Amino acid sequence: MIESLLKASKTDKVLVATAAGTDDTLSGDILDLQDCDSVTGIAILGDVTTTSVVTLKAYTGDESALGDGAYETVNATVTADATSADNKLLILDVVKSGKRYCRFDIVRATANAVVDGVVGIRYNFRTIPTTQSTDVVSSNISVN
């Protein structure tokens, strides 16, 4: 049982906000999974135009620059209607991939989509508590 997500995980902002665009791939920062087994990517969407297709993919490999990398077979995708994807989330959980490094990519197609950022949460650490990344400027735990 996890008593504190903050102590049992490490959170990074891996992709900053990106203006509306289509027919492109936005690549996030590479995360090192050396001391953990799993990572979740959370893409935060902004204004997404009708018919836009937005996909969150995980690219994994054992080389630090992902020269040996490949996309995981599962991804998270939405095809937008007038409001279905506006200000929503896409979440992809990569559980025990067996690879050392992971990068989350956003693929945008068909019509414009704004991406407000992507957050990576590493978890299933071998040793806890963890120390948060430098992307986290403040954190605390409330226990009642």
Image (spheres, rainbow, N blue to C red):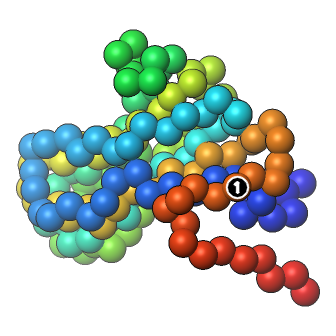
Classify 10 Å Cα crowding around label 1: few (below 14), some (14-19), many (20 and above). few
Q: Is residue 90 visible?
A: no
At horizontal 23% and vertical 45% (from top left) the residue drawn is: 26
Horizontal side, residue 49 vs residue 139: left or right: left
Up/down of 111 relative to 35, above or below: below
**Percent position of residue 49, x then y:** 14, 66
At horizontal 72% and vertical 77% (from top left) the residue drawn is: 140
For mark 1, what is the residue? 131
Q: Quadrant of the C terminus?
A: bottom right
At horizontal 70% and vertical 34% (from top left) the residue drawn is: 35
State how many labels appear. Answer: 1
Horizontal side, residue 5 vs residue 139: left or right: right
**Percent position of residue 130, x then y:** 74, 52
In front of the other: 108 or 85: 108
**Percent position of residue 96, x then y:** 66, 29
User: Which residue is farthest bottom?
Assistant: 144
Asked which quadrant contains residue 25, the reply is top left
At horizontal 51% and vertical 28% (from top left) the residue drawn is: 101
In front of the other: 36 or 88: 36
Up/down of 120 relative to 68, above or below: below
Up/down of 58 relative to 139, above or below: above
Horizontal side, residue 43 vs residue 95: left or right: left
Q: Quadrant of the N terminus?
A: bottom right
**Percent position of residue 55, x then y:** 30, 45
Asked which quadrant contains residue 44, the reply is bottom left
In front of the other: 65 or 143: 65
Three-letter amino acid code at disc 1? Thr
- Mark 1, secondary structure of its residue: loop
Q: Is residue 88 visible?
A: yes
